[in-house]
Image (cartoon, rainbow, N blue to C red):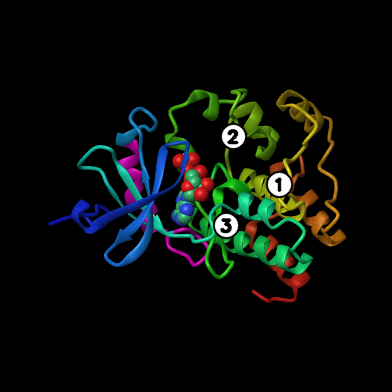
Amino acid sequence: IQDQWQLNPLELKLEKKLGSGQFGLVMGGTWRDKKVAVKMIKEGAMSEAEFKEEAKVMTKLSHSKLVQLYGVVTQRSPMCMVFEFMEQGALLDYLKNKRGTFSPNTLLEMCLDVCDGMNYLEMSNYLHRDLAARNCLVSKDNVVKVADFGMARFVLDNDYTISPGSKFPVRWSALEVIKYGRYTSKSDVWAFGVLMWEVFSEGHLPYENLNNTQVVHSIDRGQRLSKPNLAPEDVHVLMKWCWKDNPEDRPTFGQLLHQLGSIANVFY
Ligand code: ADP
């Protein structure tokens, strides 16, 4: 008898390469007649023992705005993670490729999708730790879903995981994360504010003309990202709420969902 999150490799068919990321190759394929994306974990990229335990928890997280993890294959090498297939790929690429075609309302809907998924994670007491447009995906009917939640803990590359590593996501990190590695749902909220900025700037790099060191100094001095042209004033007000110095002064995802919903006239 198999554990539910452990998939039978014989039921998995790999077809073509979709991309590559932090952990290695990502392949498109099918699992039990469902289209799936399969992350093949390259040797030495992940702390595997800890991950196996966590995979069990991650497969139980299930929400329409989260990219579903169907299960993992761990009994043979390379280890694989099997995800819901997202036809339109990463949100960041989608924003850049279709720049100039979005209405402010469409952009707001994207933020609402992500906020809805993050509200579910917050209610489940689960931290994302690396929320950014590059870690969200777009479905065939333009629904944006949150991916890669919790995965940052299993990356073995210290450049990526430890501030001030060269690949550390400084531009998305709250000051208490950069300084003390203090991750909470309020640091996810900070990152969500930056994600809203990425969405409304149609995929521009936050603090484009600053290097990582300058970004830290700038936010330490209290400077914040300015309003993207396409963003309504009240959305920029929400962004700045996400970037309050004191984590306790920032909103919850529940509050953000309510506020974004009333801006969009969609009631949650
Ligand atoms: P990693 O987490 O290893 O860094 P990514 O999540 O960045 O890998 O995935 C690399 C690329 O693979 C993405 O940019 C995207 O194009 C593709 N991809 C990843 N997951 C999916 C998915 N669920 N559906 C479709 N394409 C995906």
Residue 33 sits in which quadrant?
bottom left
- Comparing labels 3 and 2, the label whose residue is closer to the camera: 3
Q: Earlier in the sequence, mark 1 or mark 3?
A: 3
Q: Magenta segment, which residues?
A: 50-67
Residue at x 68%, y 76% (from the top left corner): 267
Nearer to me, 48 or 262: 48
In-image side of 231 versus 254 (left or right): right
| Circle 2 residues within 10 Å: few <14, some 14–19, many ≥20 | few
Distance of label 3 from label 2 (alpha carbons): 18 Å
Query: Relative to 177, is 86 above or below?
Result: below
Query: Relative to 232, is 184 above or below?
Result: above
Which residue is the site of mark 2? 182
Residue at x 87%, y 59% (from the top left corner): 233
The kind of residue on which mark 1 rests is Val
- Comparing labels 2 and 1, the label whose residue is closer to the camera: 1
Which residue is the site of mark 1? 194
Query: Relative to 253, is 168 above or below?
Result: above
> How far across and how far down the image is residue 38, in percent?
36, 50
Nearer to me, 191 or 46: 46
> How far across and how far down the image is residue 241, in percent?
77, 51
Prevalent SS, magenta region:
helix
Residue at x 67%, y 60% (from the top left corner): 111
Q: Secondary structure at mark 2?
A: loop
In-image side of 19 versus 208 (left or right): left
Q: Answer yes or no: is residue 179 visible.
A: yes
Task: Confirm whether the magenta stretch covers residue 64.
Answer: yes
Return the mark for residue 42. Answer: none
The kind of residue on which mark 3 rests is Met
Does the beta carbon at disc 2 come under 8 Å from ligand 1? no
Which residue is the site of mark 3? 118
